[in-house]
Image (cartoon, helix red, strand yellow):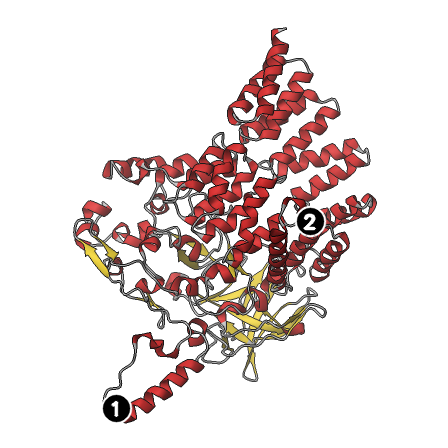
Amino acid sequence: MQKATDAAVLGDFNGATLEHFGVVSTFSRSDGKFQVRTDGPDGALHDYEIAYTFGVYPLQQYLIAMPGGRLQALGVAWDSRPKEQGGQRWFHLYPDQKLPPGDRLHWTGRDQTWNYQCADCHSTDLKKNYDLATDTYATTWSDVDVSCESCHGPGSGHVAWAKSYAGASANAATPALPETDHLGLTNWLKPVDHGHWEMNPETGIARRTEPLVSTELDTCAACHARRRPIAKDAAPGAPFLDSYAPAYLEPGLYHADGQIDGEVFEYGSFVQSRMCHAGVTCSDCHEPHSAKLRAEGNTLCGQCHMPARFDTAEHHHHQPGSAGVQCINCHMPTKTYMVVDRRRDHSFRVPRPDLTASIGTPNACTQCHTDQPADWAARAVAAWFPQGRQTQPQYGTALHAGRVGGADAEQALDKLILDRDAPAIARGSALLLLPRFASPASAPAMKAAIGDVDALVRAAAPRAMPASPSRTVVESFAALLLDPVRAVRIEAARALTGVNPQLMSPEQRSALASADIELVAAEMIDADRAEAHLNLGLFNLRRQLPEEAEAEYRTALRLDPTFVPAMVNLADLDRMQGLDQQGAELLRKAMSLEPDNADVQFSLGLLLVRQHNYADALVLLRRASELAPDNMRYGYVYAIALNSAGETGQAITVLEGAHRRSPSDRDVLLALISIERDKGDLAAALHYGHELADRYPTDMQIRMMVQDLERRQAQ
């Protein structure tokens, strides 16, 4: 981030123009200032002064000062790549989307506000200084861009050390400095374990002589992770999960096997890698002060991977001089973000075209060989490496089963959660998927997750807690309220708030009260976001504080009048208070804003059922199930409504489709059993009953139901 000066601005401001869905933006200079004429929040064209540049390569964005202390990122950026690579041009960051004023992604919208979206990682000692009452910012920083203190902490200690050292130099020929001195820096980034790397001649791979002890990953992750802050003014080098809650391997962000999909930066990928667990850190490859690599090409990888073994045709099986001989092209495939920014996956994975064939994840082979199918690549890899990685299980198969509702989803997820050799972020991701399938058989996996050595697993464990937990389950999860890691305590509070307090001891209730305070404080860090107030509204509702919940939902809508999730939850609160007519108006407004939002269609459909408008309700419930076919609850409720309306055959058809998509879904199977039994087809009911019993072998109620069906059929 730099002030917009001749030295900093790279774009063409000599009358250049760009048209995007009928809006022509014009870039010019006047009185030494850089300007853009483009559509403002009212839709009309206005002249705006460029206040700051943002970024350098491969693109540069521009920030414009707006009322309320906001800096907004213009949606048109400059492609700073060389002309022969397609650069030296203006382009729109959302080339295929029409973004009218009022859209969250329009350059004047909240999703383009620098103070929230960008500032924390691009300036030093940033103070957002947001005022909720006025919805304004008074953001400050000590340095406009990333400086020494961003990583090393306050420099006052280093200055004091330098003065002390200078004084010692005047009185001694060679003053000695203790190793523990750390130059007065509050965050010493070099390893303190005294280990070093040694090449293993048998494997051709270097290993550390001692386990790594360093704050480097925690320091870098603060800005190189998809995460949300949970501690205000986090100190550089503080334990990452004490300051931030990272995203897990969730759909839309990562593919099932952990490869990057959405814009997730590097942390979530790197912690999946074997290199991370072997003790490799960011600075082993990147020179942090110059932002350059330690070496170019395969020489960089050759630091730890013996070239005589790996930089050979016997290993890479590609022609010399071709793209396939470069390690990064196979082990760090790219994805392009922001139209021109190619970023590499940092999980350093072995290509698995076999997984492409089985679960649909991408692979590096067919990313280059675009004219070949995945099974072609899988056969080639298997021929090169008969005992290769394709012969071993990969956590992506379990996460895929959890995402699509595979028949073995529960068992696969439980196995992954218990697998200490799998990356913690993958095991935590399995916990997020487990509630949809969990039966008593999952209890050992959940219990192990609560006591797991890795905080990434423990922080995910509360999100797998059953909706109606027993006293024993509550006591187990309550232990996390006293966890040494803040992210774990907050998630435990989120899960346990609203649970019957009689299920907890006085000490546990006290711990919950303390963790609740941390949870609220964490949400209020982003008080400028409607999502934070939605979360607080849900939290207050669990605390049986409906008035406080309503206030938070209305605050969310004050900040963002188009925020549909707040409308849906406010309408649900109206339902609880017997105000369905008021809720209906909210839901219809939400539908006008997002006509393809399945949640809105479903909520309004249920409201119409309560009003006995069954014909219109069925239309909405059907639409919700079509918009979100993987949401088994929507399909289930639609089928039940059909059956209640006398459309039994259609109800069974809908349930059978849902069952094919999610063979493990308990409610869908129970509905099939019930409807088939009631219409007299005991054979079909028993078929589904046996299937359900096989899925949940320890459930006595299911076993008794099947026995009853067997008796009735025998009669």
- Residue drawn at the location 59% of the way across and 36% of the way down: 629
Left or right relative to 154: residue 117: right
Q: Nearer the viewer, residue 442 or 26?
A: 442
Q: Residue 381, located in which quarter of the rendered image?
A: top left
The x, y position of residue 276, in whole percent, is 35, 55
Left or right relative to 51: residue 568: right
Left or right relative to 625: residue 235: left
| The C terminus - image quarter | top right
Visible residue check, residue 147: no
Visible residue check, residue 264: yes
Question: The disc labelled 1 sits on which kind of residue?
Answer: Ala
The x, y position of residue 316, in whole percent, is 24, 47
For label 2, the residue is 542
Q: CA distance from mark 1 to mark 2?
A: 67 Å
For label 1, the residue is 172
Q: Residue 175, located in which quarter of the rendered image?
A: bottom left
Closer to the N terminus: mark 1 or mark 2? Answer: 1
The residue sitting at the front extreme is 506
The x, y position of residue 346, in whole percent, is 38, 55
Question: From what the image shows, is residue 578 above or below residue 545?
Answer: above
The residue sitting at the bottom extreme is 170
Q: For label 2, count other residues whose C-alpha is less than 10 Å away and answer few (under 14), some (14-19) or many (20+).
A: some
Q: Nearer the viewer, residue 243 or 395?
A: 243
Left or right relative to 701: residue 618: right
Q: Residue 686, located in which quarter of the rendered image?
A: top right
Is label 1 or label 2 in front? 1
Question: The disc labelled 2 sits on which kind of residue?
Answer: Arg
Dot 2 lies on which element?
helix
- Residue drawn at the location 39% of the way across and 50% of the way down: 272
- Residue drawn at the location 79% of the way across and 36% of the way down: 610
